[in-house]
Amino acid sequence: MSSPSVSAAFGGIVRRDLRLAARRKSEPLFTLGFFVLVSSLFPLGLGPEPELLRRIAPGVLWVAALLASMLALGRMFTADYEDGTLEQLALAPVPLVASVGGKVAAHWLVSELPLVLVSPLLALQYGLPADVIALLMISLLIGTPALSLVGAIGAALTLGVRGGGVLVALLVLPLYVPTLIFGAGAVDAGLAGMSSAANLSLLGACLIFATVFAPPAAAAAVRIALE
Amino acid sequence: MSTGLIHWFRYASPQSFYPLAGRMVPWFAWLAGLSAAAGLWIAFFVAPTDAQQGESYRIIFVHVPASWMSMFLYLVMAGWSGLGLVLNTRLSGMMAHAVAPTGALFAFLSLWTGALWGRPTWGAYWVWDARLTSELVLFFLYLGYMALNAAIDDPRRADRATAVLALVGVVNVPIIYFSVQWWNTLHQGASVSLTRAPSMAATMLAGMLVMAFAFWMYSIAAALARVRAIMLEREAHMEWTHKLKEAEA
């Protein structure tokens, strides 16, 4: 029997996870609800001054998106770990890196792409101008895949570990820092009327770096969790 | 196989490393104590007062060596972790765990002394500068490493999981080291360099190097003492630890 190709395995995992998500629609909405709620809390806590809100919008929206994406990490591997699917994937004749990559891609499509799509609405609440809103979307579009990739390492390391939910925050948030700095920095630069090209390039560098190194690390972590 | 190889690999087993570590701890502890005394003497009585910063600069003798050690110990920890993943030796994981608390201590010390130094020179205990932030991230990485280790019950799994985390976090070390060159920040540039003449008085440099040596010796002593405790804890069911207990009784 010939083993399936890496790209076929990757695509198969993505399709399977998307189908699973489509049959259980509510869960991805929790993440989205969290993002919207947290972003709406800041104006309530800080007061409705438009100037202040516009100034803090890039940082607040980025941090809210980052926390929402971190909360979603628990879903990436847990169900498959508990019902033994992950073990089957590890035993399959395809490299585990491809399967893990597929799971990360599906997780991004289900949990994080909605955040990117709803961010213009929240940005309007904060009174950001249209060109900065576009910049926010671009930065989130580049940055959130990097968050998913890095988060996959933390999610895999804490599989079946006591207090996994809080622990994953402690492991993953320090590693999210560069993405947050460059992502929010790009929007901030746009808001100040400067070029955000430098920050976007560095954000892209983060994404490339994460794409190369995170899947093997996450796959190694999955293997350790399965031992 | 040559006898030299056998000799070295013998100490990869906790049973034979335990007594060796026990014999080495006092030596390194004494070296640490003596060189710290010498370094502090240079720092307080020999080194001249700084032209710009007055007496407050003297905290450099703790701050800079502590920062060096916090970064270096992370590399040591990652090195042991990588060795443990590749060779699958028991001792490597134990050494990595033994180094982590000392590294976290130095990262904390570096942040704390930095805050005390920042107040008189910058007018603030804390600024969100690239080097300070990345040192803070390093401290969080140490905490995450220790938390993950504490959360996993099976020691072999804990070894391997924390090893992956340590290797992932190693990206941060060059970021801290080069942050003052990459970003134009408040934190002053490196005062010591191998490639050009140091921008400070020779006695200041000597004091700093002696203090760095003291911290180095302390780290080795603390790590060896801690690894002995970890060995006893993990191998409590083995024969050699029982023999040890009988010998003491």
Image (spheres, coloured by chain):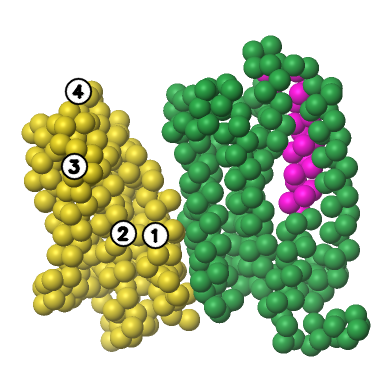
Chain colours: A yellow, B green
Q: Which mark is residue A169?
A: 1
The residue indicated by pointer 4 is: A193
Tell me the kind of residue under disc 3.
Pro
- Was residue A84 drawn as part of the magenta stretch in this picture? no
User: Mark number for residue A43?
Assistant: 3
At 66% from the left edge and 44% from the top edge, which residue is drawn? B69
The x, y position of residue B180, in whole percent, is 51, 29
Q: Main secondary structure of the magenta part?
A: helix
Tell me the distance, in whole angstroms, between the alpha carbons under discs 3 and 1.
25 Å
On whether disc 4 and disc 3 are found on a single subunit, the reply is: yes
Dividing the picture into quarters, in which one does residue A24 lie? bottom left
Does the magenta portion include B201?
yes
Callout 1 touching callout 2 (CB < 8 Å): yes
Residue B206 percent coordinates (x, y): 80, 28
- Residue at image mark 2: A70
Q: What residue lies at 58% left-to-right and 76% top-to-bottom?
A: B156
Residue type, label 4: Gly
Residues drawn in magenta: B198-220
Q: Earlier in the sequence, mark 4 or mark 3?
A: 3
